[in-house]
Structures are given as C-alpha cells and as structure tokens.
Amino acid sequence: MRKKIVAGNWKMNLSFEEGQQLTSELVNMFKDEAIQDVVVVINPPFPHLYPVQRLVGDTAGVFLGAQNCSDKESGAFTGEVSAKILASFGVSYVILGHSERREYFKEDQTLLATKVNQALAHGLTPIFCCGESLEIRESGTHEETVKAQVTASLFHLSPEEFSKVVIAYEPIWAIGTGKTASAEQAQEMHAALRSHLASKYGQAIAEQTSILYGGSANPGNAKELFGKPDVDGGLIGGASLKSRDFIEIVKSF
Ligand code: PEP
C-alpha cells in the first residue's frame, strides 16, 4: 500500500523563535493525538532544519525535509546546500521543482533532473512538484504539460530509483491563491499521472507511488481531496504555518 504523506512547506517564513514555537506545538499535538499511518514531513528554511530536528527527536511518523538542494555534489558553490550535507543533518525529504523555484529561479527540467539524481544518491526522497499555469489549464493542455514535466525530470531514473520518488501535483493557479482545485480536478490529474507512470514503470510501481496534491489545501477541503482514490496526501504551504490547521489536515485521512 502506498504511503499517505502530508508535507508542510514553510517557504521563506518564520524566525527562529516562531519556528521553534510551531514545531513544539506540532510535536505536542502529535504526542496527544497519535497520528496513525500518515507520514508527516516538515520542510522549513535551511537554518531551521537542525533545531527543528532536535525538537522532533524520535516523534513517530514525523520527518524533516528541505525545500531545495544543489545540483552539485560539493565544492566551491557559495550559498548552495548539497543533498549530501542535508542527509548528514538527518534530513529525509527534499522538495524539488516547486513552481516558485521554476519561475523565480529559472530552474529548468534538466537542472531538476540533476537535483533529483543528487537527492537520490544521498538517500533523500525527492518530493517532485509539477503543475500547470492557469493559461495552460484554460487551453486544455494541462495533462500533457504536467506529464511532460514528469517525463523530462524523472523518466531517466531506473525503476528502483523511481520507486523512491514522491510526486506533488500543484496547479500553479491554486498555490497561495485560496483557489483550490476541486477534488474531481485533482483526482483526474492524479489518475492521469498514475497511468503515465504505469506506461513507463509498470502498474506495480505506479500503484505504490504517492501523489500529493498542493494548492490552497486547508482543514476545510483536505478531507474531500484526500478522499479521492489517487490523492495520497498533500503539500501544504500557508496552512502549514498554523499548528492547529496543519494537524487538522493530517487528521483528514
Ligand atoms: C505550496 O507552495 O507548495 C503550496 C501548496 O502553497 P499553499 O498551500 O499556500 O497554496
């Protein structure tokens, strides 16, 4: 059975104190309200990773993720953080291909493929984001666009490598806009993605790949989204900054 995953993406938010406060609240809530069968990933900005890790400790089901990693192994790349360094700090997941990185930092499909390789080489699970703009959705080419993103940055992987990847479908028009894809729209895309994965890696691998939905998910819509057969969880931005909202989302399964 594939994993159910809820990953919180703090983006470039929260001071040290605020991050510690939020993490303490989450850890306490997870202790009080044991969350069964859901993997929770906290993806704070880089400087938070180590102090957040210390607070999370061995809390069952809670893992640490980064929001990015370098495409390089190591060396003179000022300002970059490698997958190798992240792994050595106990990080387990890394978000790659987020639309904000594609748009503002001009990360292209080839660079993303290299980052995916780096992540996998150091034992990190990539949470690979894909999604279409409003313009593309309105033109009706959203499925082929999203499939092409996956093909370009992931389909060079061997079946063994690919089976370690998590996919997050994030329609750009729904990110941070308060406009969520309907559960039906999410299901339709997730099912299309799964059959695309099956065409390359076979049904068994496609069936065990977790495909998360991201884009203005909140406690009010998570239950309906997660109730769809091909929606295996969420990548949560804004609502991951409020402990109660985040926990409610985790409990939506
Ligand atoms: C995201 O940035 O990955 C995201 C889903 O953001 P939000 O939940 O705020 O739309």
Image (cartoon, grey):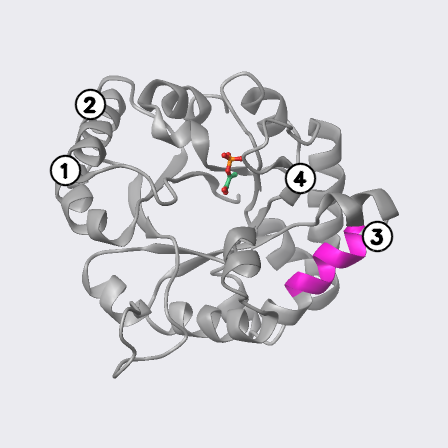
Q: Quadrant of residue 110?
A: bottom right
Name the residue that disc number 3 marks.
141
Q: Position of residue 131 (x, y in %)?
A: 65, 50
Name the residue that disc number 4 marks.
173
Amino acid at dot 2: Asn
Please tell me whether mark 4 sits on a helix, a strand or a loop.
helix
Q: Is residue 226 above or below residue 48?
A: above
Please tell me whether mark 1 sits on a helix, a strand or a loop.
helix
Q: Quadrant of residue 217?
A: top right
Name the residue that disc number 1 marks.
55
Q: Which residues are magenta?
A: 142-150
Q: CA distance from mark 4 to mark 3?
A: 14 Å
Q: Position of residue 164 (x, y in %)?
A: 47, 61
Whether the residues at callouts 4 and 1 have beta carbons within 8 Å, the answer is no
Choose mark 1 or mark 3, whichever is in front. Answer: 3
Amino acid at dot 4: Trp
Q: Quadrant of residue 170?
A: top right
Picture residue at 31% right of the left edge, 69% below the top: 80
Name the residue that disc number 2 marks.
28
